[in-house]
Amino acid sequence: MPIRPVLWVKESQPTIEGAGVHLHRAFGEPNAALDPFLLLDDFGSDDPADYVAGFPWHPHRGIETITYLLAGQVDHGDSLGNKGVIGPGDVQWMTAGGGIIHQEMPKAIAPMRGFQLWANLPAAHKMMRPRYRDVAAATIPLVEAGAGVQVRVVCGDVGGVRGPVTDIVTDPEYLDVRLAADAVFEHPLPAGKNGFAYVFEGGASFGDDGTKAERGRLVVFGDGDRARIAAGAKGARFLLVSGRPLKEPVAWGGPIVMNTREELMQAFEEYRNGTFIR
């Protein structure tokens, strides 16, 4: 099986979102090599002033948001009546579908560290019934996938061990991979899927040519059947994410992603006139 080459490496950029949350954005625009994924934010600080303002009530339509917390706590509430708190190692997988209004409010507990990924929904599922899943850390398997290789399987399969999140229309895989110093991890990334890695601890080399990426770098893979990652002398930890591309038009306005400008304008009009939630 050919090992996937690296198309490019990109450094995440500081930005401010929500009511004043300081974070680093790995990507935040449509790109054919990242399809169906739209955005990846890396948030983390030892100062609650950087994040406690949070993300007050706001709408989403046409996407899924996946929040993975490494440290801290986040309160969540939504228009479906769901309420909860996610903590270290937990995942919140929210399918906005035809429309949801929610808030995500970090508690003033330091440190705070985590990620939010946005995945697009295909046109046929843009208006699906919204749903919300709290995935407890204890339900996410930790797989010893070789010498010095540990993988938390949120979604997908590693060595026959499946993650707890299933029944997702874009057939994604979401892994948290930790490599000891100089450890090597090879993992199938089937042809027909797009994939990327985001390094958040240490550094590693990717692909046959050994393209290097350190903390805070996004690594986007080209075509092939598997990914190969070799940790550096300090080890590495990274997200490894893949999904089936939609290859559809994207009309994106803030928290709403549709296929046409007309659909986008309709969504905002429904939000203004109170008919957004169905």
Image (cartoon, grey):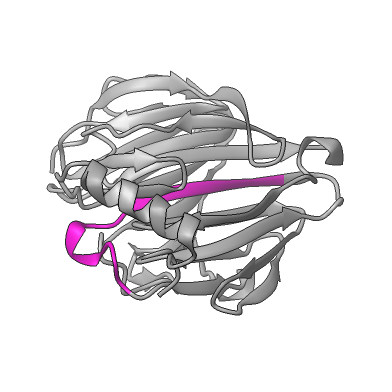
Image check: 21 left or right of 154?
Answer: right
Residue 273 location, x and y as percent? 47, 60
Q: Nearer the viewer, residue 69 or 240?
A: 69
Q: Quadrant of the C terminus?
A: bottom left
Q: Is residue 81 above or below residue 266?
A: below
Is residue 20 magenta-colored? no
Q: Nearer the viewer, residue 108 or 201?
A: 108
Give the residue drawn at x 43%, y 65%.
276
Q: Is residue 94 above or below residue 35?
A: below
Image check: 234 left or right of 258?
Answer: right
Residue 236 location, x and y as percent? 55, 36
Residue 66 location, x and y as percent? 49, 56
Give the residue drawn at x 36%, y 51%.
119
Residue 242 location, x and y as percent? 31, 49
Q: Nearer the viewer, residue 37 or 111?
A: 37
Give the residue drawn at x 29%, y 37%.
34
Identify the magenta region.
113-128
